Image: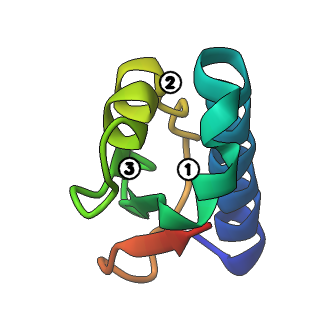
Amino acid sequence: MDHFQRVELEYAVRLQVVKILIGEAEHLMEYLSLVVMQINPSNGYVLVNEETPEPLFSKIKNNLVQPKPKKGVKVSSSLQVSLNF
């Protein structure tokens, strides 16, 4: 995954989390900075880190849509990317 693809995926994940919170629990938006997400760059799989407090964790986990993997994407690293909002 090159830099542009990683930034694009990170932005998509952030946008999805904000939309989930607006739709499910807008009153929790002020706690967005407590959300921690992890992205596996080899397959684009996204998960909510368990450090994210409830009810944020459950709301996001239950509504998170996994990105569709792009074909032909080369992975330069097996490290996971963590996002703090």
Question: At label 2, which amino acid type do we have?
Answer: Val
| Nearest to the observer: residue 26 or residue 59 | 26
Question: At label 1, which amino acid type do we have?
Answer: Gly
Residue 6's place in the image compared with 64, above or below, is below
Residue 85's place in the image compared with 47, above or below, is below
x%, y% of residue 72?
55, 50
Between disc 1 and disc 2, the foreground one is: 2
Question: At label 3, which amino acid type do we have?
Answer: Asn
Between disc 3 and disc 2, the foreground one is: 2
In primary-sequence order, the first of circles 1 and 2 is 2
| Nearest to the observer: residue 3 or residue 59 | 59
Residue 38's place in the image compared with 23, above or below, is below
| Nearest to the observer: residue 42 or residue 37 | 37
In primary-sequence order, the first of circles 3 and 2 is 3
x%, y% of residue 25?
60, 25
In primary-sequence order, the first of circles 1 and 3 is 3
Task: Give the class, few, some or many, for how many residues have Cα within 10 Å of label 3's Cα (few <14, many ≥20).
Answer: some
Q: Secondary structure at mark 3?
A: loop
Quadrant position of the N terminus in the picture: bottom right
Q: Which residue is mark 1?
A: 72
The CA span between labels 3 and 2 is 14 Å
The CA span between labels 1 and 3 is 11 Å
Between disc 1 and disc 3, the foreground one is: 3
Q: Which mark is residue 64?
A: none
Say which residue appears at 34% left-offset and 41% top-offset: 57
Q: Which mark is residue 65?
A: 2
Q: Which residue is mark 3?
A: 43
Residue 80's place in the image compared with 70, above or below, is below
| Residue closest to the far left | 50
Say which residue appears at 61% left-offset and 56% top-offset: 32
Q: Secondary structure at mark 1?
A: loop
